[in-house]
Amino acid sequence: MFRKPAWSREGVDWPHKWASKTVAVGSMSWHVQTMGTGPTLLLLHGTGSATHSWGKLMPLLAPRYTLVAPDLPGHGFTSTPKGDGLSLLGMADLTAALVAKLELKPFALIGHSAGAALAAQMLLAGQVSASHLIAINGAFKPFDGMAAHVFPAIAKLFALNPLTILGLAAGGGDVARVTKLMDATGSKLDARTLALYARLFNTPGHVAGVMGMMARWDLNPLVSRLANLTIPTTLIIGSGDLAVSPDVSAGVAGLLRNAQLVTLPGLGHLAHEEDAASVVNVIEAALMAPPD
């Protein structure tokens, strides 16, 4: 078992630590942050991240909404499931169980990158209901060509190799390396945010969770069903996203019956971490708009 992030070490000054709690659901131990008042918004972060990804966004929405943000399975301070718990279907099952345990009735689901795909999967499977879906640079498209076979295979190889995980984690704490990695997404993050990512990537348990998720993530069945998603959906695009092409969200918008596309100029894949205020403006406008 790889060492997971610990509150006594990685979490000592975690953003909004006062809003954190641990929730046990079956064999899973979840880290969940809750703040605000009003209709509930469920926030689902992307691959490799944790609740800190919403650190700037949550206080801006808290005066009008109740924000519930978990660390996804295998990420941050949430435990890592066995078997297929890190696959899209497995993660949807586990997250739906958390929603049931907390007795949440989300008004909207907000997902970033892979978190947007997870939100869509849960909605299409009837595991959760909501009045709106908001995707921030949603990662809905599988890899193309040879990459569809090579990337998951490499991730699986890494996930099964303890020495590789330890080696990746050993270099993960280098802020310069993390900065280079984040720059490759098209986003420019502040020093505090970069340090938090470095802290996570320096922890073998977090790295193992990320690699295990990448090795098991299969989007093809989801993509084939997206046209069945009928609730109002807002697709937020950072025009400078280098991780997920803006064309992906544009393509998804063409599949959906009730979608709007909003482009934020100059922002990258982590748009909500770069400029939370601009993303919040889009979210609030979408949630207050009357349904078609």
Image (tube, rainbow, N blue to C red):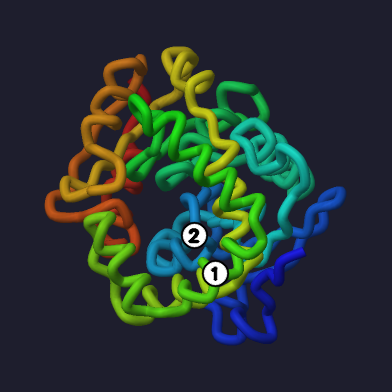
The residue singled out by tag 2 in the image is 49
Task: Tell whether 54 sits left or right of 93.
Answer: left
The residue singled out by tag 1 in the image is 167
Would you place residue 260 above or below residue 109 in this image?
Answer: above
Question: How many numbered callouts?
Answer: 2
Q: Please state which of residues 126 and 6 is positioned toward the viewer in this rendering.
A: 6
Would you place residue 180 above or below residue 91 in this image?
Answer: below
Task: Tell whether 135 sits left or right of 46.
Answer: left
Q: Which residue is drawn at 35% across and 15% down?
A: 257
Position of the N terminus, as image quadrant, is bottom right
Q: Could you tell me which secondary element the residue under label 1 belongs to? A: helix
Q: What residue type is labelled 1?
A: Gly
Q: Which residue is drawn at 51% across and 66% down?
A: 168
**Is residue 230 at all visible to an observer of this figure?**
no
Percent x, y for residue 99? 70, 44
Q: Which residue is drawn at 24% across and 27% down?
A: 250
Percent x, y for residue 27? 85, 51
Q: What residue type is labelled 2?
A: Ser
